[in-house]
Image (cartoon, rainbow, N blue to C red):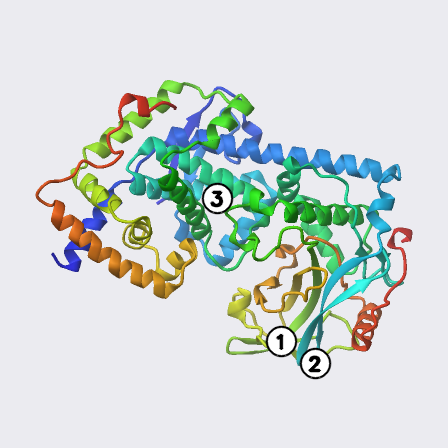
Amino acid sequence: MVLQQRLCFKDFFGSLFSSVQPSSAACITIVEMPENKYSLDEQRQLIERAKHTSAAFGGVFDMYYPAILAYITRRTGDIALAEDMTSDVFIKALHGLANFTWKGVPISAWLYKIATNELRMYYRKKKYTSSLDELEERTDFEPLDERDFIEELIEEQAQLERHQTFLHVQACLAQLPLKYQEVLVLRFVEQKKVSEIAQIVDKREGTIKSLLSRGLRLLRHTVEKTAMQPPTPRGIIPNEGQINKP
Amino acid sequence: MNDKDLHTILSKLQDAQPSLPRHQARTRALVLQEYTRQQTSYRHTLSTFMRQLIQGKTMKISFTSPLVIAGIMLLTGTASAAALYWFNTSVSSSTNNSIVSISADNCPSIPASQTRAVGVTLPVVYSFNEKYQIIDGSKINQQQITQAALAMCEERAIAAGINQAFPDMQEFSATKLAPNSKGLYFPIYLSGTISAVQGDQLTIDNLSSNSANATTATFQLANGALLTKESRHIGNVQVGDNVYFAYQNRAVAGETPNQSNPNSLEMTTDPGSLSVIRGIGVLTTDNDALQKLQAAISSGAVKVLQSDPRQG
């Protein structure tokens, strides 16, 4: 299914968008395309085009943004954080694009790898500074209505908080060491193959299988232990101060 | 609790599928604006360099340095070999302008803050058409030489600050591109025709196109790896298809070019899709030049090809 979204901004960035409507230059239409629509060869061509044109890179962005956002949200349970981190994944992808060497690995694996690295850094430091803010300041970017972004964020976070099963599973998972969280989510939630996970986390396939096996055992133990008393998940319920940026 | 129950529980995480269309659009706009900024920054750098070149300010430092490190892959018979050669001339080519090498030992200063910008837009400098012309044997022009020199300088700048600039890029990790190395990317372009397809193995004929010295070669890398469709990501091909190669090697003083990484060889049926475009070292389809190169490599004395392509 192809999903289209039409959005407008106060600033004129018409020349930057591939999908600008001539009648309304300050609006864009985002078209989300499923990744599996493209063969590896087509993905290779897409990444090569992205090195040449911003429109093609915009296509990569459109195609993978939802998946990366969802992945980070599932790992953190915090949508405001996921917003920031997802933005940075694509900024880092942009900076690394010129040196991206095609090796037959799907584009998604490259982006998941960057995202996984961002998550590791976050969990090690327990804080996150987004480059998006710096970009906004430097470019003097002004969206149409900041309240829209805040409302969107609150709405999505509230929806997440209503999902008790998600909260419980996410909280149990968050208690595991990071290395197990990564492989379990990539395998059972993101539905990645073991070979893809190996590429994303830079480990051998045999190691991934071991981590999955041990991770499941640990998760089972954690779930059974907390079944009677669902724990309060980490970072799931933000206070108003946590939603400090649109 | 069994595994099935556990998987069911895990699958609940899939329900978290946030939709943030406004945030997506804003981030997209910002990222693409950054993309454009980088391109603009690079064009400014390039135009400054070109202007200096025209004024003769950078000619000396760009083209008269004594050493060019080049990794050359020889394709002949049933095997190939890779070797490291040191050219004594700064700009060298055959009389047919077939092989050009450029030294960039003393690069113009590229501020660290601009190294990314330079890297991002290199493909713009070498557009598909320009690459195609090179592959087909067209004369390399002054602008291309300049761009190639700049690309080499950019590689050095990246090599110097690689760990800071690209922390997430595994293929550019410090273990593969040592800090302070004088690594240059040196691509070789070749073309040929597929004469046989057996299973996953390809046989390439007429290497470098119209060469009278054409060989029927089962293409092998120096380490013995066979050229396979799978390893080259070439997809479906058949006998008679023309294929194009680009071999990129990083040659470092005192170090043998990396022969163990077959991924550094690209093969494609679409020359416009070759991504190996950095540095210099252009092998054309010119028959005479190919023979000279092969003879020179065979003898172990690469004193090839003196001519200034700038003179046409």
Residue A135 image position (x, y, % from top left): 52, 28
Residue sitting at 50 percent across and 55 percent down? A42
Q: Nearer the viewer, residue B253 or B145?
A: B253
Residue A100 image position (x, y, % from top left): 55, 51
Q: CA distance from mark 1 to mark 3?
A: 35 Å
Helix, strand or loop status at disc 1: loop
Residue at mark 2:
B77
Residue A218 image position (x, y, % from top left): 21, 54
Front tag of 1 and 3: 1
Residue at mark 1:
B220
The amino acid pointed to by label 2 is Gly
Helix, strand or loop status at disc 3: helix
Disc 1 and disc 3 in contact, CB within 8 angstroms: no
Left-right relation of B184 to B199: right
Question: What chain does mark 1 sit on?
Answer: B
Residue sitting at 36 percent across and 36 percent down? A126
Q: Are marks 2 and 3 on the same chain?
A: no
Q: Nearer the viewer, residue A24 or A126?
A: A126
Q: Are marks 1 and 3 on the same chain?
A: no
Disc 2 and disc 3 in contact, CB within 8 angstroms: no
Residue sitting at 25 percent across and 36 percent down? A234
Left-right relation of B111 to A113: right
